[in-house]
Amino acid sequence: MPTAIFRKLVLPGEWTWPDVLQDIQPDPLNETNQNLIALASRRLHLDLSSKAGPQHWYHFVSRQIAHHLRFVGRIYSTSDSIKSGTPSEPPVSLAVAWSVRSKPELVAVKWSMMVQAIIYASAPVGLNVGAQGELGVALLSTMAIDLAMSQRYSNHLRYYISAWPAPSANTKYAALYGLVSVHDWLCTLTGSKYVECAPAVSGSSSGYPGSEDGDQVMADQDQADQGLPSQLASWARRAWLNFTHPAILPKQIPHDRRIGTELLRELWIRHATAQGVSNQAGWDLLIPVYESHSDQPPNGADKFDETKLSIQQAAGAQDKRARGRRCKESPSAATSRVHKWSHT
């Protein structure tokens, strides 16, 4: 049960989400903020790396390790620095995702609480939020998948947490592992504007069949038939995703290299995105998607076909002016560009 795993992440085990955002206090060491950071760390990559400096670092990180399943990643022998993080553990991240999504009307409020806790902790405890907007890209992408999931599966989620009637196995599965279309996720992420960016540099394309333009940002449902390129719209409604956490890649991947099916398959099974190293060129997140033959998500009766896996790329604001692209409008386009990539 997700609840049993969730209780291992918080202290005390019976802790529950605050009722309102105003309950969050600016003390990174208090119980609520410690719990919120522990939960956010299972959905986002939040490093705690510090030399002597941040005044609350030791007290904060020692409690996170002792009570919130945080790990010591590296102790540097040549300095007094310690790096701490959370590895990819799909059941743990799934439990946190379920807790956030379980009440659709509170998804945005819960994310607001976690963001506020991150803000309070960033300076006093040395929380690493990324030097070039990496956390912002991951944060927006993850918020969007939670909002889209909670809307599509609102009834399944409510039945799952109800005592009676007992939810069916199909209801439980959909509440935890259900898929949303790329179209719905993008509409949640970027809003109602359809934005076409300036043409890419020679040899680069947006990746969906027939496109020779630069980046494309999805329109909302009502506008999709009025301006969205038909091939992109068709693909986005047949492409599906659900991710709960990032898996950190150990080394840089050349930007022009095709992504192998082994990585795609593992990411898909783990419900994970791939987050690049700090000097990764061209992208911040790789998000696996699965293409079906219709506008309905694949189900248990469908045979898994790894050739239907592809990648969406989310790039940060620093991405990458070297690629020669400038968006005409919409901050969303600057912080979250999306491509469909082929693979070998």
Image: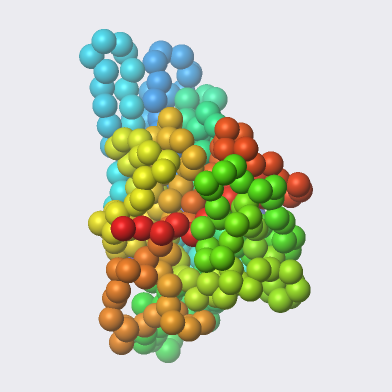
In the picture provided, is 189 more to the left or to the right than 226? left
Is residue 323 visible in the rendered image? The answer is: yes
Question: Which residue is at a point 72% across and 56% down the rendered structure image?
Answer: 195
Residue 144, given in percent of the width and then of the height, sits at 57, 59
- In the displayed structure, would residue 6 be above or below residue 41? below
Question: Which residue is at a point 64% across and 41% down the rendered structure image?
Answer: 325
Residue 326, given in percent of the width and then of the height, sits at 69, 41
In the picture provided, is 340 more to the left or to the right than 77? right
In the picture provided, is 286 more to the left or to the right than 18? left
> In which quadrant of the rendered view does residue 244 lie?
bottom left
- In the displayed structure, would residue 154 be above or below residue 115? below
Question: Which residue is at a point 39% across and 80% down the rendered structure image?
Answer: 298
Q: Nearer the viewer, residue 95 or 31?
A: 95
- In the displayed structure, would residue 279 be above or below residue 99? above
Question: Which residue is at a point 33% across and 31% down the rendered structure image?
Answer: 84
- In the displayed structure, would residue 283 be above or below residue 190? above
Quarter of the picture containing the N terminus is: bottom left
Residue 33, given in percent of the width and then of the height, sits at 51, 41
